[in-house]
Image (tube, rainbow, N blue to C red):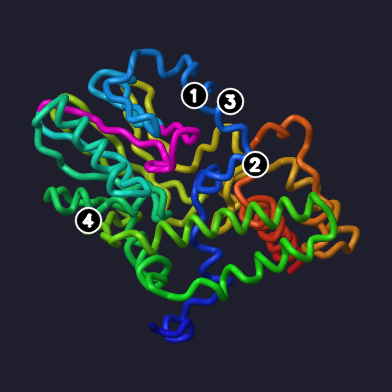
Amino acid sequence: MRAMNSLSLTRRRFLASTSCLGAALAFGKYLPLPALGEEIAQDARLGKPPLADRGYASIRPIGDGVYATVSDLSKGLTTLSNGGFIVGKDAVLLIEGFTTPAGATFQLETLRSVTQTPVRGAVDTHYHFDHSLGNAVYGSAGIPVWAHAKTAPLMVQNYANAQGVDKSTLLDPFKKKVSEAANDTEREHAQSDLNAYTIIFQAIDASVIALPNHPLDPAKLPMTVDLGGRQAIIETHPGHTLTDLIVRLPEQNIVFTGDLLFNGLIPVTVDSNMSAWRAMFDDLAEYAAKMYKAGVTVEEAVKRYTVPDKFKSYFVFGWSLTVGSSMAKLYEELNAGKS
């Protein structure tokens, strides 16, 4: 087994590059999962009955030749993220590789029940593992995987290099925080981090890392993909990560946003660009500025922060991944503004 230092994989860098949407939802203590499932099922935007439903995800038509793969995290973590596919007369564009090969297989098999039209490519909206670890399914089917040019290097750095490595040195600090928590609130925050990273590490070790083989140069985006009577526009909007892509169908007012849009969850910001992704963070920004001006350390500000009542129903995927990283980045920006 290779030593951690031979991989240049530090705890801080690993923790700053493995966020995901919803992995910790397996731990129902932190979110009423049946309620979440009911909310998804009743969402009016889903409208039409599902074309296919595996419980953990369903695939539904949401437009003319446009289908959404919608995860139900209350029923399993096979997909975690949302995705879909766009069908034109000449070609198809798939969106997202999901967390597991089973998730990508479900989407590909459902597509094939709709059409045998050739697939132009599969788009990873960013490098995070819940959007990319199922890529091997597409590769084995001869489907090119498209992604931001920085996606493949980041997957190698943070996922491929982490496989087979003893993760205890990364998890021990979280276990220590749980055992040494000063109160129930701090213990819950620490436990959410431990839960999240345990599942992340398990997903990485269980996967065959398949890298995108069709890198998209951000300098050449946006680009229009003609699928035959239906055009999809791929754009880059760094915010959640440096590798964020969206797929937009302007004629139908449909956008596949990746994790640039969170619904009912406090956004994961561990490697985000806060200045580019600000609308959700007014409360955090105001609080950070107040604490900063008062001379409070970022660590103490994170401990003191309380989620406002209007966001109390939002799930927190790891306190350090959401509130902690947001506060740290806001402090960095405030420091930069002084110079």
Q: Residue furthest right?
A: 294
Mark 3 is on which residue type? Ala
Which-is-in-front pick, marks 3 and 1? 3
* Residue that numbered label 4 is attached to: 214
Badge number at residue 35: 3
| x and y percentages locating residue 170 in the rendered image | 56, 71
Mark 1 neighbour class, 10 Å CA radius: few under 14, some 14 to 19, many 20 or more: some
- In this rendering, is residue 242 above or below 309? below
Residue contact at pointers 4 and 1, CB within 8 angstroms: no
Q: Earlier in the sequence, mark 2 or mark 3?
A: 2
* Residue that numbered label 1 is attached to: 40
Give the Cα separation between the discs numbered 2 and 3. Answer: 12 Å
SS for tag 1?
helix
Task: Kindly tell me whether residue 54 is visible in this rendering.
Answer: yes
Mark 1 is on which residue type? Ile
Q: Which contiguous range is marked in magenta?
A: 71-89
SS for tag 4?
strand
Query: Which quadrant: the C terminus?
Result: bottom right
Which-is-in-front pick, marks 4 and 1? 1
**Quarter occupied by residue 46:** top left
* Residue that numbered label 2 is attached to: 30
Q: Earlier in the sequence, mark 4 or mark 2?
A: 2
Q: Earlier in the sequence, mark 2 or mark 1?
A: 2
Q: Residue at x 14, y 31 (%)?
A: 112
Q: Is residue 117 left or right of residue 330?
A: left
